[in-house]
Amino acid sequence: MRAIRPAILVALSGALPWLVHTAQAQETGPAWPVKPIRYIVPFAPTGTGDVCARFHAQGLQERLGQPVVVDNRPGASQAIGIETAVKSPADGHTLLQGTFSGLVLNPAFTEMAGKKLPFDPVRDLAPVSMVCTAPLYLALNASVPARSIKELVQLARTRPGKLTYASNGVGSTMHLAVLLFATRMGIDLLHVPYKSSPQATTDLVSGVTDMFFSGSLLLPHAKAGKVRILASGSRQRTRATPEVPTMIEAGVPDFDVSSWFGLVVPAGVPQPIIRRLHRETEAVLRAGLQGKVTDIELGASTPEELAERIRSELQTWTKVMRDAGIKPDK
């Protein structure tokens, strides 16, 4: 074997830093971030989604070394904020809080109305990670004679179309969750839509309606004995109510409904930036954000897992709406 001459070794050693730099550049992509990052939240600056986004933004800011500024863009069932993000440069300096209602329910609802949104949630956005979920619960007024999902189903079958359920509007998460439950169990319930969750909660507590599928607003009333929580909608029991079974545990097949909040970016953002955002999001959630927010569950996902969730839930809820004949004017 011929020995490598010293001159060649020197030349190769001089090239090594360039080779390493090239490999790193291919992995990390363009320098990023190079300016403040805008984090669009499609809600007003109140509520679970806004709280989650602000904690997430603060954590990203500390890790990325650039300001991450929350920009609340509410309106049009989140379409204003989403469209703003979609039309932003795909350079990684615009983030969007993508949600179950904004990326799944509203697009499905709009399709059922024969209309089109100014964006496609699958084509125009690139998922990064799940960030948090707000658990939802099925609760009864304390006077309803049922202490489990099984007993509620039996009661509903003896009173078809008589038991009422509140929601915060036609096509809302609360409406469709109970509709899915009723469809899965073969029961007929009467829908009573309200303009807001607080109004619906008030009438549930006072006995105007029999049941309501909602979030943490229900917990103080359950503690006071005014409502009875039968089950949570997520696949796993919640930290806030570990004693409450899930709907699946209670006998409702394939039921997984929670109000989730994820991180997405405009389509076309370079993959190295998406991977970096994903890594930093995982680190933020591991660093103790969960301990600062008590009424939500935190946890990252891979970009692929979030993308699949959006696609599958769009199919599921479009079918639920189509089968029920739900339209905005109903």
Image: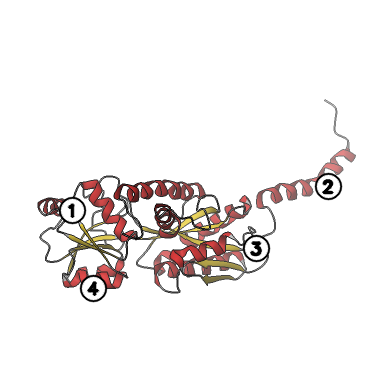
**Badge 4 or badge 2: first in the primary sequence:** 2
- Mark 4 vs mark 1: in front: 4
Q: Residue at point 48% right, 66% down?
A: 42
Mark 2 highlights which residue?
14
Snapshot quadrant of residue 244: bottom left
| Residue 34 picture location, percent across and down | 68, 65
Q: Is residue 180 visible?
A: yes
Q: Kindly identify the amino acid type of the residue bearing the numbered disc 2.
A: Gly
Of the numbered discs 2 and 3, the one sitting upstream in the chain is 2
Residue 273, which numbered label?
none
Q: Quadrant of residue 83?
A: bottom right
Mark 4 crowd level (few <14, some 14–19, many ≥20, 10 Å Cα):
some
Tell me: residue 307, above or below residue 280.
above
> Residue type at mark 3?
Pro
Q: Nearer the viewer, mark 2 or mark 1?
A: 1
Upstream in sequence: badge 3 or badge 1: 3
The residue carrying pointer 2 sits among few (fewer than 14), some (14 to 19) or many (20 or more) residues within 10 Å by Cα, namely few
Front residue of 161/290: it is 161
Q: Secondary structure at mark 4?
A: helix
Q: Which label number is shown at residue 149? A: 1
Gap between marks 3 and 4 measured at Cα: 46 Å
Q: Are marks 3 and 4 in contact (CB under 8 Å)?
A: no
Q: Which amino acid is tagged 1? A: Ile
